[in-house]
Image: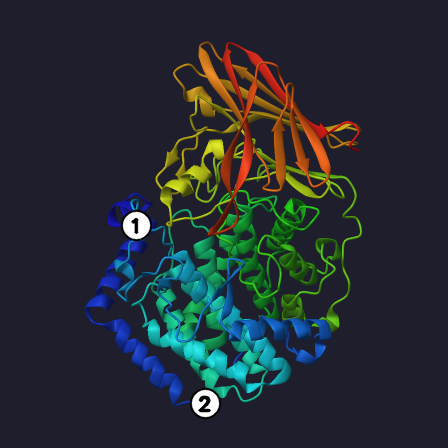
Amino acid sequence: MNIKTILSKPIPVVWYRFVQLIKLKFYFRITFWGKIERKINRFTTYRKPWKEKSCLFDKSLSPLNITETLRIKIIENADKIKSGKISIFDVDYHFNLPIAWNKDWRTSKMWKNAYFKSYAFYEKEKEQKYDVKFPWELSRLSFLITVAQAYQINENKDYLGYVHSVLLDWLSKNPLAYSVNWYPMEVSVRTINLIQLREILLESPKTDDSVNLINEILLLHGIFLWRNIEYTDIRGNHYSANLTALLLLGKVYKKFYKEARLWFNYALKNIEKEFHLQFLADGVNFEKSTSYHRLVVEFYLISFIVMKRYGIATNSLTLNKLRNACKFIKDYSKPNKSTPIIGDNDSASVFQNDVVNLNDHSNILQLASHFFSDTTLNISSTTYLSSIWIFNQKSFQETLDKNSDIFRYKYYSKGGFVVVKEKLNYFITDVGEVGMEGRGGHGHNDLFGFELMLDGQDFIVDAGCYTYTGDLALKNEMKSSAYHNILTVDGKEIAPLIGNWGIADIAKPYNLVINENQEKVTVRGKHGGYERLPDPVVHQRTFELDKNTFKLSCIDAVSCHSEHNIQRHLHFSDSVKIVIRENDVLTTVGVTQYVITCDENSKPTISSYYLSYNYGHKTSAQKVTFETKIEGTCKLHFTIEKETGNE
């Protein structure tokens, strides 16, 4: 954050960031970071390993509680990792020791070690689309947890040797505050992963040297993070990660390293208060991204588990809102347990060792079902490793929700989402504001956009989020209105994009009507995005979803005075084949066909777009655009239903 940005904030924030900036400049001048690094090395090396636990894992954790199937899977995955195959954003890459921790291996781009404040990631013109998120993800070190689990199971010293070698390699290549991997958010997530790794090693034999090494690394993380807390006026997932990391670090080290008491007390003072600022009353995270909703729920669930086990009571209103946040995850999860990629998606999670696709959020629901003793939250028949380690398999019972096949409709009025689903069909639409209290942040320009699953197959989808700094132009394109399943006017955004992250707070929904009767669910609303045009355009969108057939009708009422070009965008899954016929559009998914019929004034065209299921990976898929010239008031429509004779 630069001086200009700091000065635009409220006075308390300006003062906090100013003091932080001055202190960092002072630390740099007196070579504080190198000195404290050497001090911590001496402090940990010549002592018996500190073995205080975080309270995150169950006290009676034992590898004996793991089923034979899971044992085999853990060993297989650990062997794969030890051979060099490490999954980054759900894709395997090969790494040999020593590892180049400061390199985007896809492009060979290297970030030479330098003071962490000297890096600049927002480059608009790049010959190669390198992305710092790749070395960052590798340096989160989550893959070591699986190898440590394998060591706990069979005590094969090769697994422990691998963990120790990787940690030594990382520490030697990333001097404190002097590499690209010293960034507060990365430090926070890596801390949470290393705490989990440490807990497993503490329950394993002959691990004192490795525990000592982790203690050294974690103390350096705490010292760095305490001096780089990402505090500002409107705080998001980064600050939540900071708080969770400081809570864990403080709990573990407050009786070992004096400053850690400050970390612990600061986290305790702010965690519950911050939770209420970032989650709306119905449980939806205010950043308006399903991916970040899951991540931030993970942070707070970890925090409240640790606090509860430490004997710190949490307010019942807080717990009720957290339960609502978990219910939202359950509701937005599709019948196949995958999730819509609404808003930004950097594929982040601190429970990546559950052997589950990153777009499957059911593992956090299983954890929540244990924490709340609420069997209705769980949607998976699989026992996840996180549940075993955190809650102990002995206390685990099959808690799969038996009502998951029933037709369900849910309106999140504060968060601005409507979800309708049954056994194999699913619909979700965004009817809320832009997110992050009107700033946009990780939200997209997708008001009244929707996703549709039919007969268990993705049909209409959100395009996702391929990259951040790797390609800023593509990042903003995939955030734009035309990249979502909405109506646009004259090729303009429903709200102007601001910089790399912001969206103007002008496309506000109003006159919302959400109701259900015996035959259908109706969602209707207007937004003011195009009322800013010289010739104001008033747009009202209505969805009608038939409860018996899941036929979807979409009616767009548009009112203006001059001539305008209207485009309605439909982005299809990469498994959908599309053919434009004389009077409709025929789509095929597997062996099932669906027909899309539109008003006679609109002309459909097919084009390609990038679809991204995970960060850093994209594929080509097809979209249909219905284009219409209008003047005055008109009603446009399209319907999506199963082709006659294809039932």
Q: Where residue 490 appears, x then y in whole percent?
A: 44, 21
Amino acid found under the numbered disc labelled 2 = Lys
Give left or right: position of 608 versus 47.
right
Q: Residue at horizontal 68%, vertical 42%? A: 457
Which residue is at the front of the view, 134 or 115? 134
Q: Which residue lies under the disc numbered 1? A: 14
In the rendered image, the vertical position of residue 209 relative to residue 115, given as above or below = below
SS of the residue at dot 1? Answer: helix
Q: Where residue 178 appears, x then y in whole percent?
A: 29, 68
Which residue is at the front of the view, 333 or 218? 333
Give left or right: position of 185 versus 117.
right
Q: In terms of image quadrants, where is residue 353?
A: bottom right
**Spatial CA span between label 2 and label 1:** 43 Å
Q: Where residue 192 appears, x then y in whole percent?
A: 50, 67
Q: In terms of image quadrants, where is residue 640?
A: top right
Asked if the residues shown at circle 2 and circle 1 are in contact, with their CB atoms under 8 angstroms apart, the answer is: no
Q: Residue furthest left?
A: 29
Which residue is at the front of the view, 167 or 645? 645
Badge nearest the viewer, 2 or 1: 2
